[in-house]
Image (cartoon, rainbow, N blue to C red):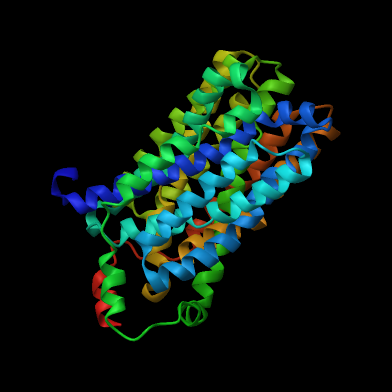
Amino acid sequence: MPHALTPPQRSAILAAYLGWTLDAFDFFLLVFLQGAIAASFGTDIKSVSEALFLTLAARPFGAFAFGWLAERHGRRPVLMVVICAFSAFSVLSGFARSLSELLLVRALFGFAMGGEWGIGASLVMETIPPRARGLVSGLLQSGYPSGYFLASLAYYLFFDRVGWRGMFFIGVVPALVVLLIRSRVEESPVHLALAKGPRANPLAAIAKHWRTALYLVVLMTAFNFFSHGTQDLYPTFLQQQHEFDTHTTALLTAAMNVGAIVGGLSFGTWSERVGRRRAIVVASLLALPVIPLWAFASTPLMLGAGGFLVQVAVQGAWGVVPVHLNELSPPLARGLLPGFAYQLGNLLASRNAPLQAAIAKAHGGNYGLALALVAGVTALVLAALALLGPERRDVDFVAEAASG
């Protein structure tokens, strides 16, 4: 498949993948640093976990604002603004003088972060041929665990030397590389086709397809409980419940994210053969038999195996999301709806970290129980939602735009 792509198509894929990787890297730095931040500000982890909530809660507002701009001014220029913004707020996180300041900065970071995924995914999906969407969808979504993997690697290498504040300064460097790549990316051909006609109102298109839009929001709420419920407090689970040191925590988290990358690529590609819904259902249900090993094992080796396998399932389901959301979105709102639905689902699932921290606290610090409860329930709900929902595999985006 890659040899059939043109240089502009490959550049768009690489830019979107690296952008989402960097985005996730900056987000997941915080999950490793909650204990250190709590100690620095004289508070507890539950209070610091509010930063994760605020980041997730702010993302739909950014997705809407930047998605609207992308419909008016194109995917490419808005993406470059977004990446500059969230990189700047990541650096500012390291300068916070109090927990209140950190919470504010992380909310602003979430607003900027909200614009990245939806616009990047629509740019790529509108640029590549339909037959390549499944594999590329898995590749794009693998940027998220790739960023988490890089965050675990940075934590392993630098945290003991630079502390939690220094960790936030690292994210600005790769942003410069992504900006250089994005300067060579061409605009979406679908946006160019739509720009030749009268200016459309994306909100009117969403209102016309309100049932699909509502379904996507509910679906993405379940998806976000699935991912954040298995990822955000995982380092805290290793640090607090198992009392692992910096290096062991980082290595186990890295193993988990290798599994996530394998899952995203495998199930994204598989969805071209079996369909988007079936791939999501199978991946979701595969998490269930792995949960006991992942959440209740006692040795690093078994915990690492559980983390790897559960993320094959979680990110396997997620690997289908970029293509599935873009195929289900109306052409006049594809720059806005996929990202907005994704991030609105994030908002509805944004209490996950405080919820899991509260469950763990109520059960004597048993983070494994909190992780298992959320993952098990969500896997069943997500499978049911995907099974009952619509599918539009391999729809021709350019023909849709040309026909109005």
State the image quarter where residue 94 is shown: top right
Judge from the rendering whether residue 181 lies leftward or rightward of residue 64; answer left or right.
Answer: left
In this picture, residue 145 sits left or right of residue 248 = left
Q: Is residue 187 above or below residue 3?
A: below
Q: Nearer the viewer, residue 270 or 351?
A: 351
On the image, the x and y values in percent for residue 119 come to: 42, 59
Q: Is residue 69 above or below residue 307?
A: below
Residue at image point 23% right, 53% down:
9
Marker count (numbered): 0
For residue 11, side relative to residue 243 (left or right): left
Query: In the current view of this chain or complex, which residue is farthest to the bottom?
Result: 198
State the image quarter where residue 190 is shown: bottom left
Image quarter of residue 232: top right
Q: Residue at x 67, y 42 (%)?
A: 374
Please determine whether, in this image, residue 185 is positioned above or below residue 61.
Answer: above
**Quarter in which the N terminus is drawn:** top left
Residue 56 coordinates in the image, percent (x, y): 63, 51
- Residue at image location 51% in from the left, 32% down from the top: 170
Residue 219 picture location, percent across and down: 55, 59
Name which residue lies at 47% across and 50% down.
84
Q: Is residue 137 visible?
A: yes
Query: Closer to the camera, 11 or 220?
Result: 11
Position of the C terminus, as image quadrant, is bottom left
Picture coordinates of residue 71, whole percent (x, y): 41, 71
Residue 268 visible (yes or no): no
Q: Horizontally, is 156 left or right of 261 in the view?
A: right
